[in-house]
Amino acid sequence: MLVSPGSVFRRVSERSAYGWALAAMLLLITMIGWATVQTGLIDREVNRQTAKALAQLEREQSDLLSRLELSERMEKVREAGEFNKLMLQGGAMAYAPIALVATLMSVAAILFAVVALAGNKPDYPTLMAVCVYSAVVDVAAAALRLGMMLWYRTVEVDTSLGLLVSASGESATIRACLSAIDPFRVWFWVLVAVGLVLTGQLSRRAAGLTCALFALLAIGARMILIVGVATASG
């Protein structure tokens, strides 16, 4: 898929088998999540945030609360930190595989409707196979992000175009917009378009327009979300 996707999609057009490929990708995604937990970076980041919250609480409330009340609130902050740590650890291993399957099934279902509206005969197993094999770039992206975590010793890593722009000054808004554009997601939709054409589900023009539209919609929605969060936090 990374070197010669056309050869894979030509075989898909003959036999729409994707079960083992999907199982292998889910296993790899789960292992990457487990490796992320084992690095201890999630624990370190949550501990840092908890320590920051405790320091702020002690600084702002020490003169307003009794020592007992302050101690109780600090204990609640620590408990919230431990809960957040468990949620992030579980999410690293469980959320990503579930989200991948749900996304692939949703995309295949939408493409099924698009193919039907285009006047062709849609085949859901073929469409699902196209999506599954195209999702190999998601595994590559997850592996790259794990490598970046280990290299930079932080869980806050990014593979979007936002890395090309400084986060300070007037360029902060531009960076927020570029952060919505992830080359791996664009790559995914390019592979889907190739798969739709080679499996005979859509014509070259229809596949290109469909995948370009969905990619732009996804980028636009993510851009609105990122800019909205940045504005709210600012």
Image (tube, grey):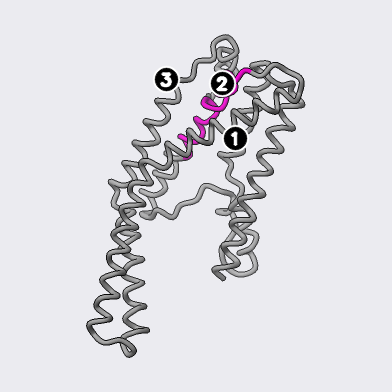
Where residue 178 sits: x, y (%)?
62, 53
**Category of crowding for the residue at label 2, using alpha-carbon neighbours closer than 10 angstroms: few (below 14), some (14–19), many (at least 20):** few
Lateral position of residue 87 relative to residue 186, left or right: left
Asked if residue 178 is among those painted magenta in the image, a careful observer would answer no
Looking at the rendered structure, the kind of residue marked 2 is: Ser
In the rendered view, does 189 fall on the left or right side of 51? right
For the residues labelled 2 and 3, say whether their Cβ atoms are less than 8 Å apart.
no
Residue 115, position in %: x, y? Answer: 70, 24
The span from disc 2 to disc 1 (Cα, nearest Å) is 14 Å
- Tell me the CA gap for discs 2 and 3: 19 Å
Mark 2 or 1, closer to the camera:
1
> Is disc 3 surrounded by few (<14), some (14 to 19) or many (20+) residues within 10 Å?
few
Quarter holding residue 169: bottom right
Which of discs 1 and 3 lies nearer the camera? The answer is 3
Disc 2 is placed on an element classified as loop
Residue bearing the label numbered 1: 187
Residue positioned 44% across, 45% down in the render: 145
Q: Quadrant of residue 63?
A: bottom left
Q: In the shown orientation, is residue 203 left or right of residue 55?
A: right
Mark 3, residue position: 20
For image coordinates 60% across by 29% down, the residue present is 109
Q: Residues within 10 Å of mark 1 (few under 14, many from 20)?
A: some
The range drawn in magenta is: 123-141
> Disc 2 marks which residue?
4
Give above or below for 20 relative to 173. above
Q: Main secondary structure of the magenta part?
A: helix
Element carrying mark 3: helix
